[in-house]
Image (cartoon, grey):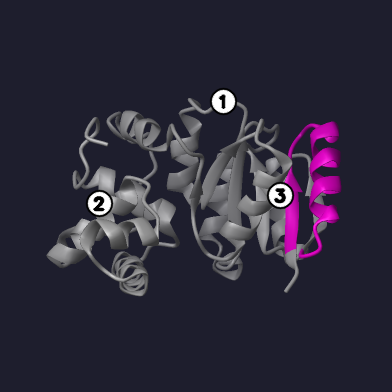
Amino acid sequence: MTIRVLLADDQNLVRASFAMLVSSAGDMEVVAEAGTGREAVALARSARADLIVMDIRMPDLDGIEATRLIAADEDLAGVKVLVLTTYETDENIVEALRAGASGFLVKDIRPTELLDAIRTVAAGESLLSPGPTSRLIARFLRAPNTGTTSAVGGPSGLSERERQVLALVARGLNNSEIADALGLSPLTAKTHVSRIMGKLGARDRAQLVIVAYESGLVIPGTV
């Protein structure tokens, strides 16, 4: 199956470089390019993209608002957004995750890492840039929410085991690592994560990270 990719970045050279890279992969194709957030939203609706590589800082409408509009559109429910940013410490990353992005990466990643990220997010998994993720989310979720609210419910309806799994997801563990930590099989860990997402109405693991911090299940500074 070919992954249909929409590239959204206001820099022509960056878009051209990404387009060449994506087009070189045998399992994906660039179906459209956008130079502004509004173009990205419009093209997401018309180009039938599976995934959008979205720059945060764009004119007209920034990547966060564009992501929020896309995530709120029922007709675009299957479209994933992978945010790219110049700085790992950009507080807008958290707002992008709150808005519905499935993950983020910094622009200085290796070409193969971007292609792997596209495949991961298109497959329905979240992808958070290694290293700063937990610290970054913890830092900015301690600040007041600036007008955006989580689209998912809290963990009060989860079982004790599901709460344990959610806490480990928030710490950045994948299914195999969760299985090792709790003495489960990888399939059982995956099943728990899927059930948690269903109970909370979460789009992906990125939203699980957000709700774990917002609910206080994971305390900033403990990861």
Q: Amino acid at mark 1?
A: Tyr
Q: Mark 3 = which residue?
A: 40
Q: Please provide the residue range marked out in magenta.
A: 4-27
Name the residue nearer the viewer: 91 or 188: 188
Between the C-alphas of marks 2 and 1, the distance is 26 Å
Measured along the vertical axis of the image, is residue 50 above or below residue 63?
Answer: below
* Dot 1: element: loop
2 or 3: mark nearer the eye: 2
Classify 10 Å Cα crowding around label 1: few (below 14), some (14-19), many (20 and above): few
Ranked by sequence position, the earlier of labels 1 and 3 is 3
In the rendered structure, find residue 50 and report the number of the disc placed on it.
none
Q: Mark 1 = which residue?
A: 87
Classify 10 Å Cα crowding around label 3: few (below 14), some (14-19), many (20 and above): many
Q: How many discs appear?
A: 3
Q: Is residue 19 on the magenta stretch?
A: yes
Asked if residue 129 can be seen in this view, the reply is yes
Name the residue nearer the viewer: 210 or 191: 191
Asked if residue 39 can be seen in this view, the reply is no
